[in-house]
Amino acid sequence: VLKGVIFDLDGVITDTAEFHFRAWQDLGEKIAIPFDREFNEKLKGISRMDSLERILEHGGKNNAYTIEEKEALAKEKNDDYVELIKEITPADILPGVKKFLDDCLAAGLKLGLASASKNGPAILENLGLTDYFEIVVDPASLANGKPDPEIFLKGAEMLGLTPAECVGVEDAEAGVESINGAGMFSVGVGTADSMKEADMFVENTADLDLEAIIKAHSG
Ligand code: B16
Ligand code: MG
């Protein structure tokens, strides 16, 4: 029986991908590693430090910086990003998400957040959604980021539920892999191709339908 829903944040509840993209691109220009939107797709759901590693590898500069220098670069990107997300308001909640969250609560489901973002709580606050979530997994508490299952396993544990009693909602391939690895039913938001590993998918958040999900989960 479905008792909980664990959500990814970026790309599912709100679209901060554009802000991440702008902040990483600014940093990329400073260190002479240009990249486009297509490359940016590979950074979705990936932690801050792992994202930086991927960018450096993309520019053939994996060994160009010390750990301290990398930490300074990651901080520079985050300072930039934190400024950008101050603009977020409840109007930035993705289509249909508010209704879906209300439907979940009305059905007595517990809600959790499993975002790789250390800025998750601040973003929920700006969106006016803090009170919807019983728990937020602290990504700093994890040994391994997505695609490792740890974040979704921890979310279920914090809700006091088994993975089988939860569904996970994700827009990133690394995120779907994480949900599946946790032994949880995965709901993808994206194209048929990018969400081919998900147990079910919708193309748009507006199509998230709790009844359909409950049916498929008990399937
Ligand atoms: P921060 P999600 C992820 O969030 C983003 O998709 C990814 O682009 C970002 O690098 C990561 O959070 C870390 O974010 O730098 O704010 O800690 O999709 O897992 O909600
Ligand atoms: Mg995401």
Image (cartoon, grey):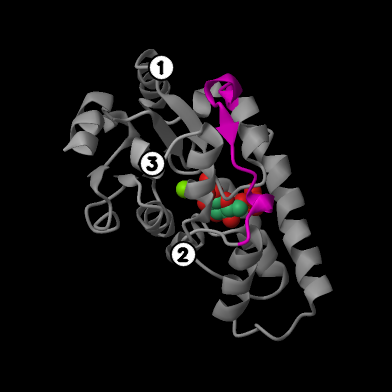
Q: How far across and down, in percent of the image, does residue 32 sit? A: 67, 76
How packed is label 1: few (under 14 Cα within 10 Å), some, or many (20 or more)?
Answer: few
What residue span does the magenta drawing correspond to? 127-143
Task: Indicate the secondary structure of the residue bearing disc 3.
Answer: strand
Residue to which mark 1 is pinned: 102
Give the farthest residue toward the left: 219
Residue 142 lies in the magenta-colored region: yes
Residue to which mark 3 is pinned: 169
Above or below, 215 against 182 in this view is above
Q: How far across and down, in percent of the image, does residue 127 sit? A: 57, 26
Quarter of the image for the N terminus: give it: top left
**The disc labelled 2 sits on which kind of residue?**
Lys
Task: Indicate the secondary structure of the residue bearing disc 1.
Answer: helix
Residue 96 lies in the magenta-colored region: no
Q: CA distance from mark 2 to mark 1?
A: 32 Å
Q: Is residue 102 visible?
A: yes
Q: CA distance from mark 3 to mark 1?
A: 16 Å
Quarter where residue 137 is shown: top right
* Residue at position x 65%, y 83% in the image: 62
- The answer to which of marks 3 and 2 sits earlier in the sequence is 2
User: Pointer 3 and pointer 1: residues touching (CB < 8 Å)?
Assistant: no
- The answer to which of marks 2 and 1 sits earlier in the sequence is 2
Q: Is residue 89 visible?
A: no
* Residue at position x 61%, y 47% in the image: 117
Quarter of the image for the C terminus: give it: top left
How packed is label 3: few (under 14 Cα within 10 Å), some, or many (20 or more)?
Answer: many
Quarter where residue 50 is shown: bottom right
How packed is label 2: few (under 14 Cα within 10 Å), some, or many (20 or more)?
Answer: some
Residue mark closest to the camera, 3 vs 2: 3
Residue to which mark 2 is pinned: 42
Could you say which is closer to the camera, residue 34 or residue 162?
162
